[in-house]
Amino acid sequence: MDVSVTPRAAPLPIDTARALLKSVFGFEAFRAGQEEIIAALLAGENVLAVMPTGSGKSLCYQLPALVLGGVTVVVSPLIALMHDQVRQLRAYGVAAASLNSGNSIEENRRTEDLLLGGSLRLLYVAPERLTRSDTVNLLRDAGVCLLAIDEAHCVSQWGHDFRPEYLELGRIRAELGDVRAIALTATADAPTRNDIVEKLFAKRPCIFVRSFDRPNLRLAMAPKTSAPRQVLSFVAAHKGMSGIVYCLSRKRTEEYARMLAAEGYRALPYHAGMEAPARQASQDAFLQEDGAIIVATIAFGMGIDKPDVRFVCHADLPQNIESYYQEIGRAGRDGLPADTLTLYGLDEMRLRREWIEQAQTSDERKRIDRQRLNALIALCEAPRCRRQTLLAYFGEHSQPCGNCDLCLHRVEVFDGTVEAQKAMSAIVRTGQRFGTEHLVNLLTGEATEAIQRFRHDSLPTFGVGRDRKAGDWRSIIRQIYAAGLIAQDIVQHGRWTVTEAGWRVLRGQEKVELRQDVLSGDKSTRRRQKTPSIAANGVAVDQVLLNSLKKLRTALARQQQVPAYVIFPDRTLIDMAARRPASLEAMRQVDGVGQVKLERYGAAFLDVVQRHAAPSP
């Protein structure tokens, strides 16, 4: 009797991807949003993926690269990012390399040989190199199966990191045989997304826009009172943790690094004016050491993939709301709790506006840049949940988050119509010709030389605001500015004028609410809550064991001259400390421990766990 056997169907590509997720990367399940993106790519679709920092964008092309075979070319804007990604992939046992000007000629030749020999799975290339005809010919000969374009917002002139070389990527993709592609970014509003689609794809791709929310980040902002004291207070609440302090100027970067170092912190400066070796040394120490703090200008950050940054502090106002979102996004990439604090003042608002107006850009670009800066200023003085205000800018509706300074401290608002009217009356009665300090002196009745010279001490508004401090009036001016009631003419020395919305309030046609908390100095930093104690799946982690595991990780990272997270990220060590594996087989169940890392590091970390668990002699 013949028995027919139905042949077993070949596993679906997404099933293969799931198996590799565990065996190579050590993860049991996809993060939110990853699986549908990977499935679309494996089905032959082109993809635009807008995902928040820390959501696992890289895995969305790394896993397909392993499933598809052949070579995946990753366009990355920074050499530092390429090196880190390559080192991470090699630590997982994945054949990866990069072609860039930072390599030696011999290293690039070896990479080309591996590429043509079919030994590579992922090749990282800078956009500048990819535009060269010899590189295109090389890749055509190698047979590229997937093109991944990281930091895709760089293609858009409306984006905050425009790179002209990115404009060539659509043409190059066509020259490579219209190979399937994925464009990825964490920061792209609707105009930028439209630009990416138009410039990189011949026809509309599958578009995945995940929430811009980063719920693990605690958001806080405060007006400047004493910025150095405020920064020190914030950093002190995160002792022993890695963090970034952003400053507006190179000089301030050096000053703050010295200030923190004098207080016993491992604080390192980073800015474009430093010699390359010194700058690289600061970056390497930050990546390899636990508890290091980098004090930097915006020259630092893009392409830095350190997952265990526990805080980001802006000692000065960021450039715009996209820059703010991207820079705070460098904290908490591992999904664990992280803190942010942004300090702001009117001088910086004026300076940012000056830069926009003086830039050699089109009127339309200036209009958009003003809009983005206005959105950031409104966020600074927001009377409601900061996350609601931030997400609303990106077109998302959300409920109060419970994890920002305004939610945590229940900011009190009051009817500030009379105060707003007093401030705007001072502006109007002085001919709309004066800046903040002159108006504050007028309101508080301070008979300065300028007040007397212009005979403003005889105006009805002279001293009308004596019931409030000068600092209160500065805050009121900031708040009504954020509310759109007044405008600042930066060409005319920062003089204030009243807008149409302001005139409606001045005439009593509309009311305005103001925040009470910012009128009495810096309360938000004094009342900050500390970062929650570390736990894994609800299980409290033994801090002594965790510190021992981190010490081993640091030693291995220094020995191999790689960032500490290339060995294991914090979340893996936290899970390890919670599980306390008793064998290599049990170690395999730890989040982030794939087969290759188990073979390389499993025994050493298991020894630390066992020695820690053993009773004292």
Image (spheres, rainbow, N blue to C red):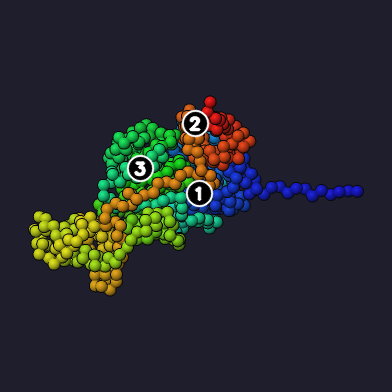
| Of 295 and 341, the residue lying toward us | 341
**Residue 106 image position (x, y, % from top left):** 49, 29
**Residue 347 image position (x, y, % from top left):** 25, 52
- Under circle 3, the secondary element is helix
Residue 575 seen: yes
Task: Indicate which label's residue lies in the foreground, 1 or 3.
Answer: 3
Label pair 1/3, CB-CB below 8 angstroms: no
- Identify the amino acid type marked 3: Val
Residue name at image x 53 percent, y 32 percent = 612
Q: Residues within 10 Å of mark 2 (few under 14, many from 20)?
A: some
Residues under labels 3 and 2: Cα distance?
Answer: 25 Å
For residue 552, the mark is: 2
Which of the marked residues, 1 or 3, is nearer the chain's N terminus?
Answer: 1
Residue name at image x 57 percent, y 40 percent = 579
Which of the marked residues, 2 or 1, is nearer the chain's N terminus?
Answer: 1
Q: In which quarter of the image is residue 274?
A: top left
- Identify the amino acid type marked 2: Leu
Label pair 2/1, CB-CB below 8 angstroms: no
Q: Look at mark 1 in the image and give the residue it sits on.
A: 55
Residue 526 in the image: above or below residue 428: above
Q: Residue furthest right?
A: 1
- Identify the amino acid type marked 1: Ser
Residue name at image x 30 percent, y 57 percent = 517
- Under circle 2, the secondary element is helix
Q: Look at mark 3 in the image and give the residue it sits on.
A: 235
Q: In which quarter of the image is residue 275?
A: top left
